[in-house]
Image: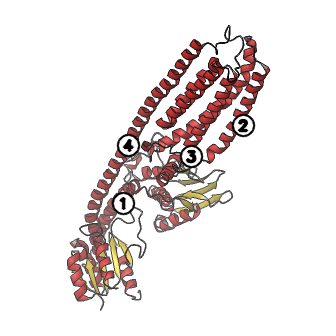
Amino acid sequence: MIKLVPDWTKEYVEFWDAIKRRNLLFIKLRYIAVLMLLGFGYFASLIELQLTPTQKLLILFIAVIIFLYNVAFQFIRPKLKSEAGKFNPLHLSLLQILFDLTALTILVYFTGGIESPLLAFYVFHMIIGSLILPTYIIYTIAGLSFTVITAMALLQFYSVIPSFPIRRLYSQPEFDNIRFVLVSLIDFALLIFVSVFLANKIAHQLYKREKQLVETLEKLNVAENRKQKYIMGIVHEIKSPIAATKSILDLVSKGYVGKLSEEVKAKIKRAEARTDEALEMINTILRISGMRLLNQKKFALVDIVKILRKVIDSYSEIARSKNIYIELIEKGKRKDNVEGDEKLLELVFSNIVANALKYSETNGHIQLTVSYGRKSVEIQICDDGIGVPPHELDKIFDSYYRSANLKELKTEGTGLGLSLVKEIVEQHNGKIKAKSPSPLGSEKRPGTCFKIKLPYSVKRTEPDEALLTIKGGV
Amino acid sequence: MDLIAIVDDDKDIVETTGLILQANGFDVVKAYEPGEAYNLIKERKPDLIILDVMMNEPDDGFFLAQRLRREGIETPILMYTSISKAIGMEFGKSEIVSVDDFVEKPISSDELLTKVKKLLNIEGE
């Protein structure tokens, strides 16, 4: 297999993507070329060019051939993998150019050789080739084209092979006029070699710039990682003393260091609750940093209902203490083929359920509904808590945002939870929306609804796949 | 009487753990850094080791656990962790080193006692 892949494309996904896109474009353009070729006969008769029956038949024949090999290319294209060592999209590009040039050369021969109006079409292939093929290959192709045309012109000049000029295009045939032949050949040579030279230069500059952009992006990613590590380091340092404090408070409140009066016990309990809040915030920040840092998503088939049950279970004690009724409803035929990261989804639901519990009063009602759609599963979590003011609904997913009506409430929160929830849902290519009032609400307690839509399959982006294959193939 | 070694560079955590365990009838020995801990464990041969996963350096705790296991010391190890659950990375049993269980900080006296008793095969109340 010819080595077509330039060195600078190694591990450069954009390159393969561009090749794939261009291959598709060429295939589409070729269908138009077929139509134009078929229209050529008609157009020629309009302006009274006289095509011989041989010429007409040949143009038709070539049009059919081009159509057929284009169908074949279209069929092969999606099956190719971006691997450097095997037959890849770049080889398909080369094959397309070679087929096209062969068809074009035959057409040129039967439409007058050096006189042919189709000679200019070589330029397109030179430009296209320069954009996608390595420099040495496209120069070889240009040289080959020039050699073939020169040979054709000379052989026709010396009448070694027959000529098929389009009658009435020129006042008289020019293929036997040595001055015309010479000037045309020099013209042709300049045309194709200058096109290749210019297009090559421009293409390489563009690729280099694109590559620089990608490299800059990678540097940004590294910086972001460093930042997350730094945050984790600091937050972990902060966690240690708070965790120690909480451990000591637990010890004191359990009476290990002596009996406590009810008043002291109540204060210690309060201190414990406050340290719990701090720890919860810290854990959320660590979770976010960890997720961004490790990018640790493990997509597998998950059972949404099972995850929801687990979440409900983990909050059952708090729910009981506030006498809040949590129910789980399933709508539609159950499907257990949702693709997702179990741990992360658990985090999503547990955050929302925790919020619902936090902002619901005694005797509240929380309803979790799972509905199975055609392409996605929808999870709705509604409560009859304090609700969210309408003008703040779109802000609750912002980091560090806390609704105005929460400030009157005694509960504390980071405002980080929902931004994490949104991030995770989006990583699953899902959508989340908040609604208030909720169907469960009343005038006094409007309540909030969260609607999460998760597609059954998390679509992976193509570049990732391409990157993997290149890394393995080069 | 079971002897439990507590190893952590946070003195408050060591003291707290010690108080809880002593109040529940265990004997404890304490160490605040890996080298000291190693000597103590070799010398006193405790029935259970409580070890902090990250002491001064990340992996210090794991490193010590690995060293003990390599030397054939099969004493059960209960590991204190700080960020495992938070970053969604729960250590499975015997995944990296064969430690026997984990307690995430802050330490809840109830959880600690349950796990200690389980590891020492003591029937719960």
Asked if residue A444 can be seen in this view, the reply is: no
Marks 1/2 same chain: yes
Which mark is in front, 4 or 3? Answer: 3
Label 4 marks a residue whose chain is A
Q: Which mark is residue A472?
A: none
In the displayed structure image, the side of residue A235 where residue A381 appears, left or right: right
Residue A87 to residue A234: above or below: above
Q: Amino acid at mark 3?
A: Asn
User: Picture coordinates of residue A304 (x, y %)?
Assistant: 57, 60
Q: Amino acid at mark 1?
A: Asn
Marks 4/3 same chain: yes
Structural distance between the alpha carbons of marks 2 and 4: 42 Å
Q: Earlier in the sequence, mark 4 or mark 1?
A: 4
Structural distance between the alpha carbons of marks 4 and 1: 33 Å
Q: Earlier in the sequence, mark 3 or mark 1?
A: 3
Q: Are marks 2 and 4 in contact (CB under 8 Å)?
A: no
Q: Are marks 4 and 1 in contact (CB under 8 Å)?
A: no
Between residues A286 and A163, which one lies in front from this camera angle? A163
The residue to which callout 2 is attached is: A68
The residue to which callout 1 is attached is: A283
In the displayed structure image, the side of residue A264 where residue A185 appears, left or right: right
Q: Are marks 3 and 1 in contact (CB under 8 Å)?
A: no
The residue to which callout 3 is attached is: A88
What residue appears at the point 78 percent right and 25 percent down from the top-left corner?
A: A57
